[in-house]
């Protein structure tokens, strides 16, 4: 089965997720002349950067209370989608006057968030270049079971990448666990397969930093614990972390939409 066939039933078009801002969580109208705290407005939505965190689910911003590099802080930034009434907001690392900025790129069946600017790293790949993609988004309009879709897609990709049939059959959804967003999960092989093949915690014969390390279930599967999935706000999000300090908090990713009254608010 070709991977593209997995999406046919969904008739997916980027930005067409059937979501509207929650009525009791609408942000302030961007037509106001100035922000109450005299702070900056985000250029796309016009929302006050110093106040917009009040409209987020607090659980999505919890990582911002942790350790960060000296001289750096988290600020809310935005990335506009191709739909002028939709934006993606997130906590971005800001260091020495430079703030992480992600760039949106739409495809036929999915979209990506790539590095535009990194607030922490120098010389990151430009948007569209190899290694620049931080997040891949799959719209979920018409999808009855998002996790089942993701598992099917991961298995299909693993087959295309010549994974063994026994490995593909063992792929399953599991929670990402501690250190990840509360709604994060991964596609990984089951415990029986790990034990049979001495993977992960069952690898007691190796020493050193790579003991227990493995990858499984293809490009959308387990890669040593650096990447994970989330389902929220009308999208399935595949987050590609690096071994270095993340320069934005993927757990904070939130879709905002402009209502008929001109006010922006989260779709959740």
Image (cartoon, rainbow, N blue to C red):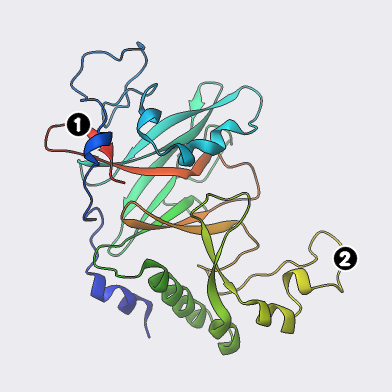
Q: Is residue 47 left or right of residue 168?
A: left
Q: Residues within 10 Å of mark 1 (few under 14, many from 20)?
A: some
Whether residue 130 can be seen here: no
For image coordinates 50% across by 83% down, the residue present is: 159
- Badges 1 and 2: C-beta atoms under 8 Å apart? no
In the rendered image of this protein, does residue 13 appear above or below residue 191?
above
Labels 1 and 2: the sequence-earlier one: 2
Q: Residue at x 35, y 18 (%)?
A: 40
In the image, taking residue 158 as reference, residue 56 lies left or right, namely: left
- Looking at the image, the residue that sits furthest to the bottom is 165
Judging by the rendered image, the residue that carries numbered circle 1 is 263
Query: Residue 16, located in which quarter of the rendered image?
Result: bottom left
Q: Residue at x 35, y 70 (%)?
A: 145
Tally of numbered tags: 2
Percent coordinates x, y for residue 146 in the rendering: 37, 67
Q: Regarding mark 2 in the picture, which secondary structure is present there? A: loop
Q: CA distance from mark 1 to mark 2?
A: 57 Å
What residue lies at 56% left-to-right and 75% top-to-bottom?
A: 217
Near mark 2 (Cα within 10 A), the count class, few <14, some 14-19 or many ≥20, is few
Rendered image: mark on residue 207: 2
Residue 238's disc number: none
**Viewer-nearest of discs 1 and 2:** 1
Q: Is residue 134 above or below residue 138?
A: above
Q: Position of residue 186 (x, y in %)?
A: 54, 64
Residue farthest along the left direction in this orientation:
260
Residue 72 lies in what quarter of the image? top right
Instruction: Give coordinates of residue 30: x percent, y percent.
Output: 22, 24
């Amino acid at each position: 089965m070709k991977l593209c066939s997995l999406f046919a039933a969904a008739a997916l078009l980027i930005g067409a997720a059937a979501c509207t801002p929650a009525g009791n969580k609408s942000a302030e109208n961007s037509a106001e002349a100035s922000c109450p705290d005299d702070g900056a407005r985000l250029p796309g939505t016009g929302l006050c950067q110093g106040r917009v965190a009040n409209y987020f689910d607090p659980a999505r911003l919890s990582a911002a209370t942790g350790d960060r590099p000296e001289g750096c802080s988290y600020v809310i930034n935005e990335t506009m989608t191709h739909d002028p009434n939709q934006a993606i907001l997130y906590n971005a690392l800001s260091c020495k006057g430079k703030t992480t900025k992600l760039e949106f790129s739409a495809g036929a069946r999915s979209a990506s968030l790539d590095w535009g600017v990194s607030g922490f790293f120098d010389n990151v790949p430009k948007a569209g270049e190899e290694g620049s993609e931080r997040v891949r988004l799959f719209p979920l309009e018409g999808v009855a079971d998002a996790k089942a879709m993701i598992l099917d897609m991961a298995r299909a990709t693993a087959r295309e990448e010549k994974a063994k049939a026994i490995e593909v059959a063992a792929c399953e959804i599991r929670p990402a666990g501690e250190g990840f967003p509360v709604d994060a999960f991964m596609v990984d092989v089951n415990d029986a397969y790990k034990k049979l093949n001495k993977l992960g915690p069952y690898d007691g014969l190796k020493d050193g930093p790579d003991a227990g390390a493995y990858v499984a279930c293809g490009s959308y599967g387990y890669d040593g614990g650096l990447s994970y999935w989330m389902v929220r706000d009308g999208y399935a999000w595949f987050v590609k972390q690096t071994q270095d300090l993340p320069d934005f908090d993927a757990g904070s990713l939130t879709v905002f939409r402009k209502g008929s009254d001109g006010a922006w608010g989260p779709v959740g």
